[in-house]
Image: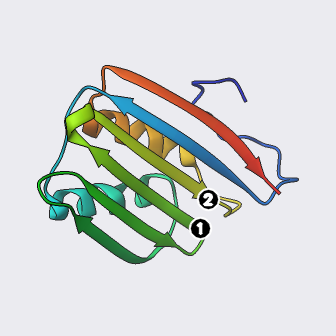
Amino acid sequence: MKKGSSALSTNTKHAGTHLIIEFWGGKIIESASEIKRILLETAKESNNTPVGVKIHKFNPHGLTGFVLLAESHISIHTWPELDYVAIDIFSCGKNSQPYKGLDYLKKEFQPRKVKFREIKRG
């Protein structure tokens, strides 16, 4: 799949698709409840099924969040002091659409710079 493409890969001979995503600039969200909402909506947008959520807020800033999916996971780590957000979307469901989740995250965070790579797992 081309880098930056939002189309779902038609290759089904792998266990799953893992997107490693980096955002610089844009919104840095410090609210645990807002991050939880965003992660759950990302799961919905990428056609995945959440089975658990955990968010940890650090002092004085930054957070880590994780959504356990029936199809794998979505995680986020923020560094406000670096204006940086790291996100993983790993999904192994045959109907999962991780690039739709990436598109949703771009709308939410409005980063100035985006870097991502796709890893076919298995």
Q: Earlier in the sequence, mark 2 or mark 1?
A: 1
Inter-mark Cα distance, 2 to 1: 5 Å
> Which x, y percent locates residue 101?
46, 46
Q: Is residue 33 above or below residue 51?
A: above
Which residue is painted at 40% across and 66% down in the image? 66
**Quadrant location of the N terminus?**
top right
Say which quarter of the image contains residue 44: bottom left
Tell how many labels. 2
> Which x, y percent locates residue 45?
43, 52
Q: Would residue 109 be found to the left or right of residue 72 on screen?
A: left
Q: The disc labelled 2 sits on which kind of residue?
A: Ser
SS for callout 1 = strand
Labels 2 and 1 touching (C-beta < 8 A) = yes
Q: Would residue 30 be found to the left or right of residue 18 on screen?
A: left
Label 2 sits on residue? 91
Which residue is painted at 58% across and 44% down in the image? 19
Residue situated furthest right in the rendering: 13
Q: Would residue 42 be found to the left or right of residue 58 on screen?
A: right
> Which x, y percent locates residue 57?
20, 63
Residue 57 is labelled as none
Q: The disc labelled 1 sits on which kind of residue?
A: Ser
Which residue is painted at 16% across and 64% down in the image? 33
SS for callout 2 = strand
Residue 72 is labelled as 1
Q: Would residue 100 be found to the left or right of residue 37 on screen?
A: right
- Quick one: label 2, few (<14), some, or many (20+) residues within 10 Å? many
Which residue is painted at 50% across and 53% down in the image? 46
